[in-house]
Image (cartoon, rainbow, N blue to C red):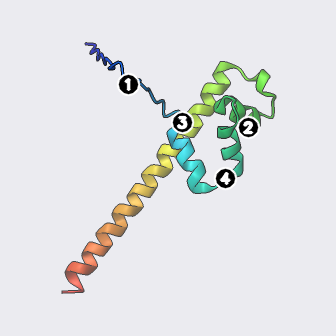
Amino acid sequence: MFFFIYIISSLDFQLVSFDYSQLELRVLAHLSNDNQLKTRLINNTDFFISLAADLLKKSEYEITPEQRQNAKQVIKFHFLFFLNLFSQSLDLLWNSLWYVRRNICT
């Protein structure tokens, strides 16, 4: 099933579309302050080709679509894995604070 949404702009307005390209990588670069990651995102190159080239010690022109996809999967796996660990740590902290408040502070 497909849904189509049509947006019609008034003559006095402009229609703008935003693409949050690699948003999670941009947030990660900001939070980690990793200069190499920032450089990859600032330069007008394909992030995953650049990453695969570094990992495989090849030039960007030698990277195949499969190698690019593998680099993309590595990033997605690691990002989701560490995000999950962070989430679990927050849950543990919250539960500990709740326990202390309920059982010790009352």
Q: CA distance from mark 1 to mark 2?
A: 46 Å
Q: Report helix, strand or loop for mark 3.
A: loop
The residues bearing labels 4 and 1 have C-alpha atoms spaced at a distance of 39 Å
Q: Earlier in the sequence, mark 1 or mark 3?
A: 1
**Residue 97, relative to residue 40: is it above or below?**
below
Residue furthest left in the image: 106
Q: Which mark is residue 55?
A: 2
Amino acid bearing label 4: Asp
Name the residue type under label 1.
Phe
Depth check: give the residue in front, 5 or 58.
5
Q: Residue at x 45, y 55 (%)?
A: 85
Q: Nearer the viewer, mark 4 or mark 1?
A: 1
Who's the residue at 67% across and 25% down the image?
67
Picture quadrant where residue 70 is located: top right
Q: Label 3: which residue? A: 22
| SS state under label 4 | loop
Is the residue marked by circle 4 packed among few (<14), some (14-19), or many (20+) residues within 10 Å?
few
- Tell me, yes or no, if residue 78 can be seen here: no
Residue type at tag 2: Leu
Whole-angstrom CA distance, mark 3 to mark 2, is: 19 Å
The numbered mark at residue 34 is 4
**Label 2 secondary element:** helix
